[in-house]
Amino acid sequence: MAVLLVPVILAVIAFAAVAAMQRARKVQAAWTAAARQLGLAHSGSGWTRPQLSGSMGGLLVRVDVYSTGGKNKTYWTRYRAVFPTPGTAVRLKRQTGLSRVTKLFGAQDVEIGDVAFDDAFVIKAGSEYQASEYLTLPRRTLLLKLYALYRGVDLTPDYLEIVTRGQETEARQLVTNTRRLVSAGRVLAGLTEDDGRVERSLRSRARGDMGAAAEELRHADSDADDIDTPLLEAEMLASSGQLAEAAPLLTGLSERLPADEEVAGLQRALERMDPAVPAADQSPVGMQEILDDLFVANRLSFETAEIFDEHYLGRSVTWSGKVQSIRDYRSDLDFGPEPGAKAVIAIAEIEHDLYGVSEIDAVVQLPAGTAARLNRGDQVTFTGQLLKADSMMRNIYVRDGRLS
């Protein structure tokens, strides 16, 4: 019996060796192809771990593989962009349940006054002023998106690092992750040209003016390494219903980011979106139902858009909340060319997977002249039809609203 087992054991060993060799060749081919596309140097061959290194967009870039654990190792792919000069004096770590508990017992971190961001991150800096000066709205928005995409993200005064699980075996994924790293790193290092458009656009978005936010970024100039500005423009155009304008932007981005989850998701969402086609179920929507479905889990904008269009578009609501702001308008990029009033009404607070405790606002279209009858802080009840949702700013848009 033992003699018969020897050929079987040798065959298994030979099969494992061939499989390992084929995998090693696949890994080396992928990293070589990625290096060629990115203009980086590739080192490592055979059984040694691969590495990419060089300069991109004014940053020193290194992509490598490391392992953790003992006998049963876990492998990770690490993407690091080193800043030309220490530019942040800020260090960020994702807030966890443990870090929230330690804060209750005296552990200190800097807070910048943005409740959602402060609750999402442990911020280390020389002072609150220093942190708030550096962590501008565009940088905060970018960092929140990076953590939503990758989770394994580390920002220090010297570098930005993204870590993904496993040794990467696909050139398209290496190219995508490296280009996103460089684009984000340039923003965080202060290398991206900034004419204030992104800041103004995001402030409009935070006020519930999604259409105006998209218009602010229309045809914005961006350098060859800037992924984030055209991606933000495409997202806002899609969310504001300007689907034809968003499509070519996403096509261009898909060529630069061939394996990007967000770009591919936005393209899928674009194919499904049709403001004229309401959800099949047109029964009234309870507030808690939609909040749990759209805003508790850490979803990217395209995921929220897909769920909203399939399950909630056009359905009626009767909700209550506190007025945060209200203004009359002659025409509005979100609600159309006819006069009306636009109210931002705080309707709930939720515990979000990334942001912690987060306020949810309804952006409500009301009849023209309503602004003269309402003040900030007024408690109101309104009815209307659901129009769209913005996952990043936690806003729900309601058209044809009426006060009860």
Image (tube, rainbow, N blue to C red):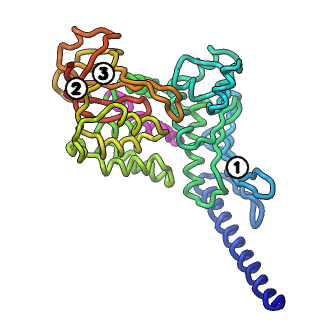
Residue at the location (81% across, 86% down)? 6
Magenta-tinted stretch: 212-232
Between disc 2 and disc 1, the foreground one is 2
Q: Nearer the viewer, residue 337 or 381?
A: 381
Residue 109 horizontal side relative to residue 212, left or right: right
Residue of label 2 = 383
The amino acid beneath tag 3 is Ser
- Where is residue 261 drawn, in percent x and y? 48, 49
> In what element is the residue under mark 3?
strand
Q: Which residue is mark 1?
A: 53
Position above or below: 146 against 116: below
Question: Marks 1 and 3, how far apart in space?
Answer: 55 Å
| Picture disc at residue 3 | none
Q: Residue furthest right?
A: 2
Q: Inspect the image, locate mark 2, and give the three-letter code of the amino acid beneath it.
A: Thr
Q: Identify residue type, mark 1.
A: Ser
Q: Residue 186: horizontal and vertical position, in percent?
A: 59, 35
Q: Residue at x 66, y 63 (%)?
A: 27
Q: Which residue is mark 3?
A: 320
First in sequence, mark 2 or 3: give its number.
Answer: 3
Please say if the residues under marks 2 and 3 sit with CB atoms less than 8 Å apart: no
Give the mark, 2 or 1, whose residue is nearer the N terminus. 1
Crowding at label 3, few (<14), some or many (≥20) Cα neighbours within 10 Å?
A: some
Name the element at disc 2: strand
Distance, label 2 to label 3, CA atoms, is: 9 Å
Magenta highlight on residue 217: yes
Label pair 1/3, CB-CB below 8 angstroms: no
- Quarter of image, res 214: top left
Mark 2 → mark 1, Cα distance in angstroms: 57 Å
- Looking at the image, which residue is at 45% across and 51% down? 254
